[in-house]
Image (spheres, grey):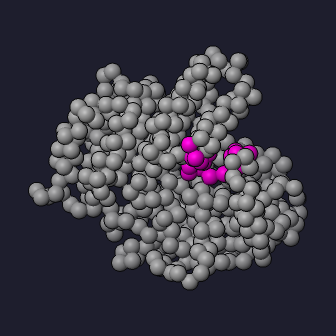
Amino acid sequence: MEQVIQAIEALLGPQGCLIDQDARRPYESGARYGNGSAACIARPANVEEAAELLRLCARDKIRIVAQGANTGLVGAASPDRSGRDVVLSMERIKGIVEIDPVDRVVQAYAGTRLSDLNQALAPHGLCFPIDLGADPSLGGMLAANTGGARLIRYGDVRHNVLGLEALLMNPPGQRLDLTNRLRKNNTGPDWKQWFIGTGGAYGIVTQAVLQVHPLPQQCATALVVPASPEAGLLLLRDAERHFSDFLTAFEGISHNAMQSVLRHLPGMQAPFEPLPPYAFLIELSSARPRSADFDLEKLFGAWLEACFGDLILDAVIDKPEVLWRLRHAISESVRHEGKVIAFDIAVPRSRLAAFREEAVALVGRGYPGVGVFDFGHWGDGGLHFNLVVPQALMEVCSEERIAVLRQEIYDLAVRKYRGSFSAEHGVGPFNQSFYDRYTAPEQQALAAGMQAAFDPERLLGATRFMSAQ
């Protein structure tokens, strides 16, 4: 490894190869999971250096783990504990290649942050509307196929990628140019899809070509208390019928999640007194400017008023930034409550209320004292079913008992409700055993065959779609 590190340092220079333990540390630990130890952190300044790094590591069969902003939650961008992995940080390969307002397309390098992308798009009246609690890089967003709170309107990352460029490991360093910007291109397999949502296991994305959307000119937001658990889905259906494409978010927030934000976010005021068992954050937006003939706030207010009684018990209409601050603060606030057992689940949205009710009952029946602090994307069937083990229960709630609880929840979601164990976070080492447990053998065999074709020596990434043997 010493010779490999010396070769990497000679290729990338002292700023491109971090060896010191303190300098490596931020890259070795994920946002929530995935603490490891890397041989070094490689930070190429351009795609050519990254390609040469792949060739260098392939010669000595050194595994490369690509990393963007390191905001993932399944350990897919973290090294293992062997001290032999090279972390390939894409943070220096960033910037906008081109913005085309007519095509509504942006081409950018993989290390570009979402916030920087939207800052560059704003003067053109455009945005990339994948709404996340973190500020990821484009490469990481493609690798994880991120979704976010506005998926109901704009889809996930996969639905907004027109093309990409990737580096392959077969042959090492091969540059695959798939950067066309066509919305219609039916000329064979859609090869870019093999690099989206696969955690860097098939290749390393270096550029992305994205379709972007008009920047909203008006927005209306409300936090709504449903008349019953079933009323939430009725509200969703009615909102879609009434507002069609203007409906951009329909987010559910539990009592415990709201209470946690009020406890831990300074200056946050309670939207309701007392807090309800559950509430929905509903957002409408439009790129059409507000006018006397078209005012979303007035249209929204009239609809909410018509729903009172049968579907709605209470509602707060406020500035979007105020209500979204409550929604986006949940994950960080819940971490202060105790040990978090996080689930990123999806079920058919028609069955989301039933699943949630059964899952809450399962926890209460078998694990008294464990709190449910859930919130979710009801518009697309996603649920962040966060459980919290209070400090007082840590001694009796062992890791083995938590593992049993986790499997019970996933069995319920996947086997009974035909859902997913990973709605938007991906596979990665943290979810590997669940991929092995729930993914059909025929599907695993196909994915493993493709991984073997793209990366015969299995030198790319921390996500495994093939046998570990």
Can the viewer see residue 333?
no
Q: In the figure, 362 relative to 106: above or below?
A: above
Report the label total.
Answer: 0
The quarter of the image holding the C terminus is: bottom right
Q: Is residue 348 magenta?
A: no
- Residue beneath the point at 56% across and 49% down: 423
Q: Nearer the viewer, residue 61 or 123?
A: 61
Q: In the figure, 360 relative to 461: above or below?
A: above
Q: Name the residue at the bottom extreme.
A: 187
Q: Nearer the viewer, residue 216 or 4?
A: 216
Give left or right: position of 294 versus 467: left
Can the viewer see residue 364?
yes
- Residue beneath the point at 35% across and 45% down: 236
- Residue beneath the point at 73% across and 46% down: 437
Q: Name the residue at the top extreme.
A: 392
Q: Nearer the viewer, residue 84 or 453?
A: 453
Q: Position of residue 179 (x, y in %)?
A: 55, 77
The quarter of the image holding the N terminus is: bottom right
Q: Position of residue 455 (x, y in %)?
A: 78, 68
Q: Name the residue at the left extreme.
A: 292
Give left or right: position of 39 versus 90: right
Q: Is residue 424 magenta?
A: yes
Q: Which image quarter: residue 168?
A: bottom right
Give left or right: position of 255 versus 113: left
Q: Position of residue 431 (x, y in %)?
A: 68, 46
Range of the magenta residues? 417-435
Q: Position of residue 225 (x, y in %)?
A: 32, 32
- Residue beneath the point at 65% across and 47% down: 74
